[in-house]
Image: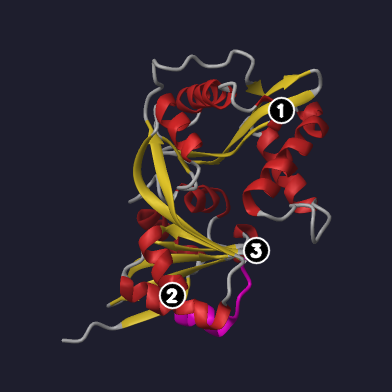
């Protein structure tokens, strides 16, 4: 008997089924899960559509379509269906990101119509920690950024984003959305930094958080103090805060060519458990 499949935008009433899929892989799906737990499935609140792939009437796979296109627990058949839908809709995202296998398949199907990409990062190790390492002592000067320190933090955030992504977050809307996101993380107590003489020398954020897992992002060390171990001691401090205050599992993903960062994260207590892929436009 042939399996009947279909793909469509999820209704808000399908939130429990969507969360069941998202929470089946809490680490890999932390970014999208954190948004859905707060905003539900309403596209306006979520900032994008949640596509579902159904087999015999049952929801099996998801794909978030917003500023990012993110395949979630996507089988090869689901990826093909999501690619067809994305191709028909036209590119509205600034990146495709997700687990390396499904993301690579998705990009191979979309590249003929969406390509070329500005940059493809095919292998970004996903790293996880459940406990701090005894090898690296946390930096006692790394602390939560206060609301009144927004202007101090922003130059470091802009520098990090520009180095990592290759374009300034201030382009387009003048940085209004980016500044709002930075302010949101500060207000939530998820932005951390070491500030010396009114300048950030280390920073990182807990960008996504659920009761099951959280994800560290935006790790940055000021160029003039690089090579002094601040990334290790700073990350040890942020990891400690994350484990004690946010979630029992902490993750991040890193570019495979950044061997120094990978070594530093390993010393702090992270281990590689999988890989992500990013396609940047």
The front one of 216 and 208 is 216
Which tag is nearer the camera, tag 2 or tag 3?
2
Q: Determine the residue positioned at 46% across, 82% down.
A: 84
Which tag is nearer the camera, tag 1 or tag 2?
1
The secondary structure that most of the magenta stretch takes on is: helix
Which tag is nearer the camera, tag 3 or tag 1?
1
Residue 46 is inside the magenta segment: no
The numbered mark at residue 224 is: 1
Q: Is residue 143 above or below residue 208?
A: above
- Which image quadrant: the N terminus? bottom left
Q: How many residues crowd around disc 2 within 10 Å: few (fewer than 14), some, or many (20 or more)?
A: few
Q: Position of residue 226 (x, y in %)?
A: 63, 28
- Asked if labels 1 and 3 touch by Cβ distance under 8 angstroms, the answer is no
Q: Is residue 129 above or below residue 111?
A: above
Q: How many residues crowd around disc 3 within 10 Å: few (fewer than 14), some, or many (20 or more)?
A: few
Q: Earlier in the sequence, mark 3 or mark 1?
A: 3
Q: Determine the residue positioned at 78% across, 25% down.
A: 199
Q: Is residue 281 above or below residue 132?
A: below
Q: Position of residue 247 (x, y in %)?
A: 44, 32
Q: Secondary structure at mark 3?
A: helix
Q: Earlier in the sequence, mark 2 or mark 3?
A: 3
Rendered image quadrant of residue 234: top right
Disc 2 marks which residue?
A: 108
Viewed as shown, does residue 248 lie left or right of 116? Answer: left
The numbered mark at residue 4 is: none
- Range of residues picked out in magenta: 83-93
Rendered image quadrant of residue 4: bottom left
Q: How many residues crowd around disc 1 within 10 Å: few (fewer than 14), some, or many (20 or more)?
A: few
Disc 3 marks which residue?
A: 44
Distance from disc 1 to disc 2, alpha carbons, whole Å, reads 40 Å
């Amino acid at each position: 008997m042939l399996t009947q499949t279909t793909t469509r935008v999820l209704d808000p009433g399908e939130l429990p089924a969507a969360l069941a899929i998202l929470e089946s892989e809490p680490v890999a799906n932390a970014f999208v899960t954190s948004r859905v737990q707060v905003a539900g499935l309403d596209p306006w609140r979520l900032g994008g559509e949640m596509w579902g792939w159904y087999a015999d009437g049952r929801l099996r796979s998801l794909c978030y379509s917003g500023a990012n296109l993110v395949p979630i627990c996507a089988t090869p058949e689901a990826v093909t269906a999501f690619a067809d839908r994305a191709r028909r809709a036209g590119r509205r995202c600034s990146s495709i990101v997700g687990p390396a296998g499904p993301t690579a398949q998705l990009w191979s199907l979309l590249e003929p119509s969406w390509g070329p990409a500005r940059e493809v990062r095919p292998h970004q190790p996903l790293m996880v920690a459940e406990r701090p390492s005894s090898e690296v002592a946390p930096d006692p000067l790394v602390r939560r950024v206060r609301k009144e320190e927004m202007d101090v933090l922003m130059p470091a955030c802009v520098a990090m984003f520009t180095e990592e992504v290759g374009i300034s977050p201030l382009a387009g809307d003048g940085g209004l959305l980016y500044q709002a996101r930075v302010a949101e993380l500060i207000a939530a107590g998820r932005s951390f930094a070491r500030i010396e003489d009114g300048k950030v020398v280390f920073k990182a954020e807990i960008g996504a958080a659920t009761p099951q897992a959280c994800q560290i992002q935006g790790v940055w060390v000021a160029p003039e103090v690089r090579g002094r171990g601040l990334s290790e001691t700073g990350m040890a401090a942020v990891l400690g805060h994350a484990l004690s205050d946010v979630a029992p599992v902490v993750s991040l993903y890193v570019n495979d060519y950044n061997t120094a960062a990978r070594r530093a994260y390993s010393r702090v207590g992270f281990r590689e458990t999988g890989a992500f892929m990013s396609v940047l436009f």
